[in-house]
Image: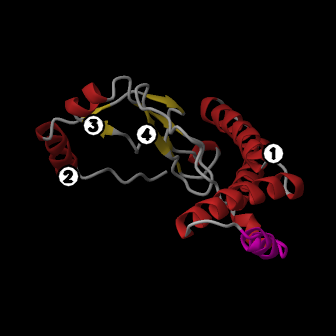
Amino acid sequence: MWRKSANGTALNDFRDCISESQLMEIPNTGFLYTWWNKQVGRFKIMGKLDRMLCNAEWCSKFQGWNYKVGSRICSDHSPIMGCGINVPSPGNMPFKFFNRWCTDPNFKDIVKASWEIPIWGHSIFILTQKLKRLKATPKKWNKEVFGNITSKVEKESKNLERMQNQFEMETVTEEFIEMMVEQEKKVELLLQQE
C-alpha cells in the first residue's frame, strides 16, 4: 500500500504557528480517530486528523472545555463538537423547525389556519400572540403525524456510535461493515427530516 507522507516543512511551519499563537489541544471524548478512508481489511486507514485548539484565555474563561468526536455519517471525517461545563444552557427552548414539515401537503394549511385566527390588541401584541400560538400548533401536529423525530435520531445515532466504536477497536466482518453503512444512511435520512 502506498502512503503519501506529509511535507515536513509545512508541518513544521504549522507547529510553529500553533506554538507562536500559544494554542493548545484540549481533551476530547468520543472516538479516538476523526478520519477513516472508507476502506476495510488491510487497506483500512484511520487517523486523528481533526483537533480542537484554544488559548489559555479561553480555557480559563470556560473551565472544563473539551470536545467530542462524533459519529461519521455523510463524510469520511467525524464531526467535532466543543462543549464546556460552565457554558449556561438557554433559559427557554428555541422553536425547532423540521424540514420534513415542508414535504407534508397539509403543513401550509395548518400554518395558515393558525395565523388567521383573530386576536385583538396593539399590532405588536397581535404579532407576538400569533407567533406564540404558531409555535405550539406545529409542535402538536408534528407529534400526531410524525412522532418524536428527535428521540429517533438519538436512538439510531447511539446505535451507529456503538457500531463505529466496535469498528474502530476491533476487526469486523464484511457483513458488519455493510450493516454499519446502512445504519449511517438511516441516521443521515433521519437528520435530513429533522
Q: Report which quarter residue 65 is drawn in.
A: top left
Residue receiving disc 2: 10
- Residue 194 appears in the picture as rendered: no
Q: Residue at x 62, y 53 (%)?
A: 95
Q: CA distance from mark 2 to mark 1?
A: 40 Å
Looking at the image, is mark 4 or mark 3 nearer the viewer? Answer: 3
Q: Residue 79's x, y, as percent? A: 51, 47
The type of residue carrying mark 4 is Lys
Q: Nearer the viewer, residue 136 or 170?
A: 136
Residues packed near mark 1 inside 10 Å, few (<14), some (14 to 19) or many (20 plus): few
**Circle nearer the N terminus (2, 1):** 2
| Local SS, label 1 | helix
**Circle nearer the N terminus (4, 3):** 4
Residue receiving disc 4: 48
| Local SS, label 4 | loop
Residue receiving disc 3: 54
- Label annotation for residue 112: none
